[in-house]
Each structure stands twice: as C-alpha cells, then as structure tokens.
Image (spheres, helix red, strand yellow):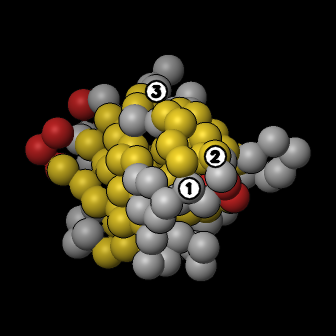
Amino acid sequence: QVQLAESGGGSVQAGGSLRLSCVAPESIDYTNSMSWFRQAPGREREGVAAIYRLYGRTYYADFAQGRFTISQDKAKNTMYLQMNNLTPEDTAMYYCAADLLPGVLWSRRDAYHYWGRGTQVTVSS
C-alpha cells in the first residue's frame, strides 16, 4: 500500500506560521497533482490547495488564498504547504493526497488514489 507521509504540524498561537511537508515514495515519482486537505472535528474533509506537478499550476480554497502557499520539490518528491497568519479556525488534521483522477476538480476528496495519515495543526487564540 502506497503511503504518503506528512510532517510539520504542531501548536502555534494565532498569527503564527507553520510549514507542512508531504513526501511521496519513489514508486509514484510522477503524479498529475498533489493536494492538501484538512478536517476539523465534526466537519467534512475540505480541500486547502493543490499543485499540478508538470507545470506547477496551483489552486487554493478561498480561506487559504493569500495566507497559504503550496509548492513542490520534484527532485525530492515532496510537496509543501506554508501557512501564515494562522487563526483558530485553521485548527484541523491536515492530509496530503496524490494522483487525482483525470478531469476531476482538485477539491473532490473522493478523487485521489493516495493519502497520508495526517498531521495535526492546532492554533490557539
């Protein structure tokens, strides 16, 4: 079973920053897209941002636009999520996903082949 590996979560105060990382094993050294999702207690998993690996095109959820930045290092098979100006509403488990089904909107959580186990982000006021 291919598994993605997230890291970088933690506890910060409001206004702080965190940088999440997601490493994909070499067995999937090329996938069409990688994305970040998050899930807060009692809420559905929602898309945060996506990056299309070939040309580096990026997409963001409205709440992430201007505060979060998704990026990639193809040589390391690694995707990043830089999160700035965090608020308590950003508290959630953050997951990375890879290999989106062709022609499907990036934010559809049922459309990815591979997932990680998540990294917890907690923002206190």
Residue 3: mark: 3
| Mark 3 residue type | Gln
At which x and y percent is residue 37?
Answer: 58, 52
Q: Is the C-beta separation of discs 3 and 1 under 8 Å?
A: no
Q: Name the residue rendered at 50%, 20% in the picture.
A: 1
10 Å neighbourhood of mark 1: few (<14), some, or many (≥20)? some
Q: Is the C-beta separation of discs 2 and 1 under 8 Å?
A: yes
Q: Quadrant of residue 51?
A: bottom left
Asked whether 60 or 20 is in front, the reply is 20
Residue 14: mark: 1
Residue 95: mark: none
| Mark 1 residue type | Ala
Q: From the viewer's perspective, is residue 94 above or below residue 104?
A: above
Of tags 2 and 3, the one toward the viewer is: 2
At which x and y percent is residue 109?
Answer: 66, 54
**In this view, which residue lies farthest toward the right?**
42
Q: CA distance from mark 2 to mark 1?
A: 6 Å
Q: Specify which label sits upstream in the sequence, 3 or 1.
A: 3
Q: From the viewer's perspective, is residue 99 above or below residue 68?
A: above
Asked whether 102 or 96 is in front, the reply is 96
At which x and y percent is residue 108?
Answer: 66, 62
At which x and y percent is residue 70?
Answer: 36, 62
Task: Tell me the element at label 2.
Answer: strand
According to the image, label 2 marks what residue? 124
10 Å neighbourhood of mark 3: few (<14), some, or many (≥20)? some
